[in-house]
Image (cartoon, rainbow, N blue to C red):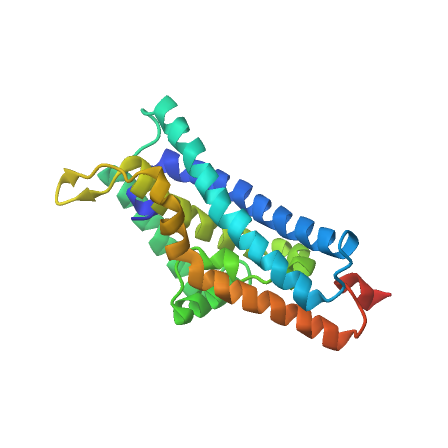
Amino acid sequence: MSLRDLNRHTRRRLHRHAWLLTLWCVSIGLATSWLLLHAFAVRSPAVRYAISAIAMYSLGLVVGARVWLVHFSRLVCGKATDLGTATPGDIAVFDSAEREQKRRDASGEGHFGWKNLLGHSLDLLNFDEAAALLIIPALVIAFVGGLLAAGVVPALLLDGLAGLLAEVAVQFVFGAYIARRVIRPKAHGEAFLSIVGRTWLAGVVFFVASAGAGWLLMQMNPGGASIADLFR
C-alpha cells in the first residue's frame, strides 16, 4: 500500500498535502522552541530541542496526519470521480517514473547525488517512508536554506510524507485490494495506532538526534541558548 496504489490525480493531491503537513510540523517545532526560550526561560538547547522534537512528532505528524485523514475523507466524497485507486495505466506510469529516478540517482545526476546518498542511509536504518521527515533534527532548520537550494529537502520530505499519507489513505479511505476483493476501509478511530506504528522508531531517532544536536550546540558555545548565539 503506497503511492503506487493510487491514481495520478490522487498522488499529486497527496504531494500538495505533504507540503502543508511539512510546514505544519516545522511550524510546531519553531513555535515550541521559541515559547520554551522566551516564555519559560529554558535556555538549554538540548532540553529545548528534545521537547520540540516530541511536539513535532506528536502534534505535528501524528495529530496532523489524523486531522488530515478526516479532511481527505470528506474531499474524496466530494470528488469521487477524480480521487481513487490506480488503474493499470497509472501503475505503469508510476513504475516508469520510479525506474527513471533510480537511474538518475545511480548516475549522480541532479542535485549533487544528495538524495541518493541520504536514501541509502535510510535503507541501512530500515526505516519506513516517513523517516525522511523525522530523521532531520531540529538543528538542521538552520541549514534549510542551503539544502533547499540543492533540492534535497523537498525531495526527501515530500516523498516520505506523501508515502505515509498514501498508506493512510489506502487503509482508511479507499480500502485495500486483496485477492480481487475490496476490503472495507478501517474505522478512523484506529488511525492513531496505525500512524504511530509506522513512525514510532523514526520518532525516537528524531528525538535522540534533536537532543544530540542541542548538546553539540552547548559544547560549541557554552552558555548560548540558540544557534544565533554562535555568531554574536
Q: Quadrant of residue 150?
A: bottom right
Number of numbered discs overlaid on the protein picture: 0
> Farthest residue toward the bottom?
219
Is any part of residue 6 visible from this angle?
A: no
Is any part of residue 67 visible from this angle?
A: yes
In this image, 208 relative to 74: left or right?
right
- Image height check: is 165 above or below 56? above
Residue drawn at 43 percent across, 46 percent down: 162
Q: Position of residue 25 (x, y in %)?
A: 57, 48
Q: Nearer the viewer, residue 15 or 216?
A: 216
Q: Quadrant of residue 217?
A: bottom right
**Quadrant containing the C terminus in the rendered view:** bottom right
Q: Nearer the viewer, residue 125 or 63?
A: 63
Residue drawn at 55 percent across, 59 percent down: 111
- Image height check: is 80 above or below 86? above
Q: Nearer the viewer, residue 75 or 120?
A: 75
Residue drawn at 55 percent across, 64 percent down: 207
> Farthest residue toward the right?
232
Q: Position of residue 141 (x, y in %)?
A: 65, 57
Q: Nearer the viewer, residue 191 or 158?
A: 191
- Image height check: is 113 above or below 130? below
